Structures are given as structure tokens and as C-alpha cells.
Image: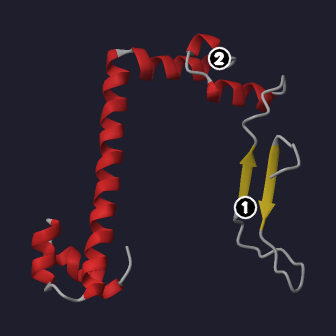
Amino acid sequence: MGAGLPIYHINRFVEETGNHFGDDAHIIYVNSQIQDETTLGRLMHDFSCADPSDMNYKILADRVRYFKSDEEGVLIMCRMLEEMRNEAALETTKEFALRLIIRGKDTLEEIAEITKLPLAEINHLKETQQI
């Protein structure tokens, strides 16, 4: 953000009136480069650590150690990563199917066969024209 602050709070306002938009949506950016001795700075340090023994916060270090070193934790992390990869692959397949639908050269049945998505999903994508 360029101001050298450790944290930035962004809230939505109506430009014409200056009034708060009122949807309770806001964004918080944290500058992870600031790793000073404040509570937030020490947390940013911990987020950048590869070795849990170098972390400031024991509870975070213990969880990192569990997911990196404990057999059960590693297995859980592997499953989670596999699920994330599968979700990303599915979204990519849906995007491809939508491009084929928009192109209009293949039947919906052909698109289902090409993408291995259920025909019902292809129909849904066509109806909504979005992913």
C-alpha cells in the first residue's frame, strides 16, 4: 500500500455522498514485511517461518509442527491439499466446458463427454452462463 504501515483497514463508501455503504464489508491488508516486536509483527514473523522452533507463538508452532511432523497431521494435510487440487481441477474443467458452450460448435452431450462432467452440470452451466 506504500505507506509503510503494518495494517490497513479498507471500508466501502459511496463516493458521491461520502457515506458509509453499510454492507459491513471491509478488507484488512497486513504488511507481512513488518516483523517488529509488536504482537502483529511477531505473528508475521511466525507466518514466514519454515521451522516451528523459530516461532514466537507456541500454539501456532505446535499446530505447524503437527501438520509438518506428526504422521496423522501430515496425512490430514496431504488429504486437504489433494481436495484443493481436485477443486481447482473441477473449476478449470467447468471453465473449459463453458468456453465450449459459448463457442457453440459441440452439442451439450459432446461437451459432457469431452469434459467428463455430468450432462446436468453442463445444462446448468449453459443456463447460468457462469461458473
Measuring from the top left, give residue 123's x and y in whole percent: 22, 82
Per the image, the residue denoted by label 2 is: 55
Q: Position of residue 85 (x, y in %)?
A: 32, 47
- Residue 117 in view of the camera: no
Give the percent coordinates (x, y) of residue 29: 73, 49
Vertical position of residue 67 compared to residue 23: above or below: above
Q: Is residue 106 left or right of residue 32?
A: left
| Helix, strand or loop status at disc 1 | strand
Q: How is the image coloured?
A: secondary structure
Q: Residue at x 63, y 27 (%)?
A: 48
Give the mark nearer the N terminus: 2 vs 1: 1
Residue type for callout 2: Met
Q: Position of residue 10 (x, y in %)?
A: 78, 60
> Which quadrant is the C terminus positioned in?
bottom left
Q: Label 1: which residue? A: 26
Q: Is residue 93 left or right of residue 21?
A: left
Do callouts 2 and 1 mark residues in contact (Cβ within 8 Å)?
A: no
Mark 1: few/some/many CA within 10 Å (<14, 14-19, 20+): few
Disc 2: CA contacts within 10 A as few (<14), some (14-19) or many (>=20): many
Within the image, what quadrant is residue 93 found in? bottom left
Q: Is residue 69 above or below residue 13?
A: above
Q: Residue at x 75, y 25 (%)?
A: 42
Give amino acid for label 1: His
Measuring 82% from the left and 80% from the top, which residue is drawn there?
Answer: 14
Label 2 to label 1: alpha-carbon separation: 29 Å
- Toward the top, the furthest residue is 53
Residue at point 89%, 84% (across, down): 17
Q: Say above or below: 115 vs 111.
A: above
**Visible residue check, residue 40:** yes
Q: Secondary structure at mark 2?
A: loop
